[in-house]
Image (cartoon, rainbow, N blue to C red):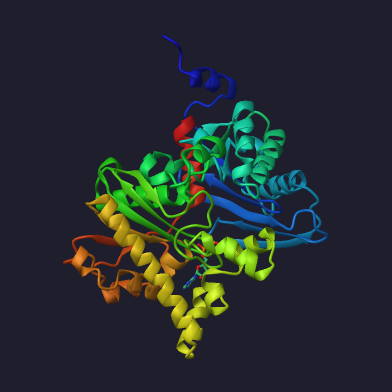
Amino acid sequence: MGLNPFFYFNLLFNVTGDLMNILVINAGSSSLKYKLFDMKQSLVMAGGVVERIGEAASLISHTVYQGDLPRKIKLAEPVKTHEAAMHRVVSLLIDPETGVIEDMSHIDAVGHRVVQGGEAFGQSILIDDRVKQAIEDNNPLAPLHNPANLTGIEVAGRIFGRVPHVAVFDTEFHQTMPEKAFLYALPYSFYETHRIRRYGFHGTSHKYVSTQAARLLGKPIEATNLISLHLGNGCSVCAVKDGACIDTSMGMTPLAGVMMGTRTGDMDPAIIGYLLEQTGLDITELDAVLNKKSGLKGICGSNDLRDIHEQAAGGSRRAVLALDMFSYQIKKYIGAYMAALGDVDTLVFTAGVGENDEIVRLKACENLSVFGIDIDLEKNKVIRSADPFHIHTPGSRIQVWVIPTNEELQIANDVVELLG
Ligand code: ADP
């Protein structure tokens, strides 16, 4: 019988189930986000972002979560590379004024957010050279994200040396989807040769709120059915059966599904060829329109729901239309996933819009009594809460919860689960 590989791993890295401080890193093309967790208490100690890396004036925002109120420090200084950014983060974390740990040896493991894991990764994984190669192999599927995520992994590997590094993929939660849900009705060879399929995104968020929902319902996650609605600037809906994803609204890329702040969501694919012919835009320009100038912004000029409500209250027909379209599309996904799931315990609203916008929540669930979904108007009014709250009536067959998401904590949890 072979020994568990973690036996050797634990000897090598002295990981004996006592992982205390986990640094979570999300490296973008010109930014580096970080959060340091004390996992003994599931508490965030410090976090922040270095933005505009490589520009003359980079911006650093660092927050220390100790004492009664978070302490925010803002700095503007040149940060030339991701490596320099990571060194700066370490210096902030250990500085007597801004820090929360004595020195780097108090970081026990690093969790890396990676956007596209493709079919290679159905779960989080300890990073080695083969994993890095597999992430690179997925670069064509996420050219804006995976190379930057990999840079973060390389840089952190050099700086934090031999502590374990774990990759957590946005796509991994969705790898349980059956073929009938993830395939597009294109020639099958496109899937085999070009890996064209639905991958889904926001997986760490859907996983986090699903786990929380099961806990709140007092059911094991393996016996919980739910529809998770992550509505932020990017939006995705996920059907979860017995704790596993069986379908999700985003597709091969995060452009598909419900209309979003600036992204189209689902549309007739023939529109693209037609627009290329009619407008003279090239494919790069059109891609920018679909990703950055469409969605709510395309309809009414703003992608922020707070502005849109203000405009609507001031009589803007387009703002009202944008709200109607958005809520209607969410409602259609709820209906579709109720049909896909059959039996649903709860709907969960999360992310910037889902957690804060009572009107979108209400409109998306309007007239769904026939499906057993009834919203309590008073409970739905709670709009600022760090804790989960439910908004269904006592008679509602299906519960409806608002659960603040915490993608970084989910990444840290995955690290602990994998290494612990
Ligand atoms: P991202 O997808 O960028 O992570 P978030 O989940 O933070 O986005 O969501 C950002 C969006 O949440 C904003 O664009 C805005 O539309 C919405 N939002 C944030 N706060 C509120 C609020 N108090 N009321 C309504 N909508 C809000």
In the image, residue 354 lies at what x, y percent?
A: 42, 65
Decide which of 24, 18 is in the foreground and name it: 24
Which residue appears farthest toward the top when viewing the image?
A: 1
In the image, residue 112 lies at what x, y percent?
A: 58, 41
Say whether residue 402 is visible: no
In the image, residue 110 lies at what x, y percent?
A: 59, 38
Say whether residue 336 is visible: yes
Residue displayed at 62% across by 35% down:
137
112 in relation to 96, above or below: above
Residue displayed at 54% across by 64% down:
271
Which residue appears farthest toward the bottom when viewing the image?
A: 315
Q: Quadrant of residue 102?
A: top right
In the image, residue 352 lies at what x, y percent?
A: 48, 65
Decide which of 59, 340 is in the foreground and name it: 340
Residue displayed at 25% across by 52% down:
217
375 in relation to 37, above or below: below
380 in relation to 192, above or below: below
Which residue appears farthest toward the right when viewing the image?
A: 56
1 in relation to 416, above or below: above
Q: Quadrant of residue 126?
A: top right
Q: Where does the N terminus fall, quadrant-wise? A: top left
Tell me if 79 is positioned left or right of 398 in this view: right
Q: How many marks?
A: 0
Tell me if 334 is positioned left or right of 404 in this view: left
